[in-house]
Amino acid sequence: MLRIAVPNKGMLSEPAWSMLGEAGYRLRSNPRQLVVHDEDNDVELFYLRPLDIAVYVGRGTIDVGITGRDLLLNSGTTALEQMPLGFGASTFRFAAPADSSISTMEDIDGKRVASSYDRLVDDYLAAHGVHADIIHLDGAVESSVQLGVADLIADVVSTGTTLRNAGLRVFGDPILRSEAIMIRSPRLGSDDDRLVILQRRLQGVLTAQRYVIMDYDIPVSKVSEAVAVTPGFESPTISPLHDKQWSAVRVMVPRDRVNLLMDRLYDVGARGIIVTALQASRI
């Protein structure tokens, strides 16, 4: 039975649950349930703290987990990234006081850096030949400079509003671009049938989220022009119609480009455009 760890709370939890649910796996029925036995799919779901998932997977007590790339790297475990999952994107950056002279990697040398991701930051600085005092904090990292605990911070940045309100400014290149990922134990081979099935299902969910099916009719003389507009995820299916002057086209296109593609197809001479949402296939 494949053991899968999912976040029990936090920003990654609900998208992870939703993805597994769409992939056909049984989820917990109440928030106090810590383990779900899904005999139909031969898996067990373990609801764990996001910070702990990489540790369990790295030690092999859990086969597969969903966590953030930042949490994996900060864990220092031997768990392996298997595939990105397309949600929970974030950027990890350095930030210093707006009136500070700290603006380059070299300026960090010898300074105090507060972060909740001390291992990740230490490894990054070491790789750049920079030595600093890394101070671990579990939260409210942006307050550490004002309180005199640190000279600068390293933290997740989205809009930057929280940092600006704390009198901080971002500088330098991103330390890491993170997102939700599926990780696996080094004891589980990448070709394990159970892992392959899980990965196919999750990939099916991602495809269904990102693409839709577009059907349209196009004059035979304009088929090549229309196909150039909608090359699709795979080659379009082109079928003859009863009216020999027209062809039917079915193609998978990116969901976020539908309106633009429809406008272009109408310009080419298409008619009867229909857009249909995909459903993730379940193996």
Image (spheres, helix red, strand yellow):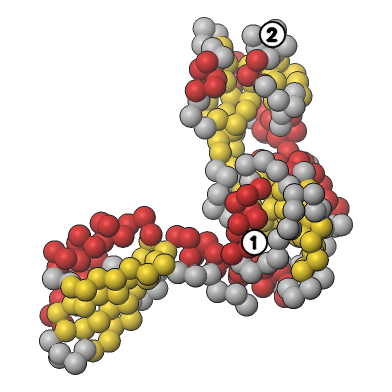
Viewer can see residue 61 = yes
Binning the other alpha carbons within 10 Å of mark 2 as few (below 14), some (14 to 19) or many (20 upward) gives: few
Q: Quadrant of the C terminus?
A: bottom right
Name the image quarter holding residue 186.
bottom right
**Residue shown at the point (33%, 68%) measured from the top left:** 275
Q: Amino acid at mark 2?
A: Leu
On the image, which quarter does residue 134 sit in? Answer: top right
**Image height of 121 relative to 242, above or below:** above
Q: What element does badge 1 sit on? A: helix
Which residue was labeled with disc 1?
A: 20
Q: Secondary structure at mark 2?
A: loop
224 relative to 31, above or below: below
Residue 22 point in image, percent of width and height? 59, 64
The percent coordinates of residue 31 (x first, y second) are: 75, 49
Residue 187 vertical position relative to residue 117 in the rendered view, above or below: below
Q: What whole-number distance in Å separates the C-alpha atoms at marks 1 and 2?
A: 42 Å
Horizontal and vertical percent for residue 155?
A: 62, 28
State the mark number for residue 147. Answer: 2
Q: Which mark is residue 115?
A: none
The amino acid pointed to by label 1 is Leu
243 on left or right of 169: left
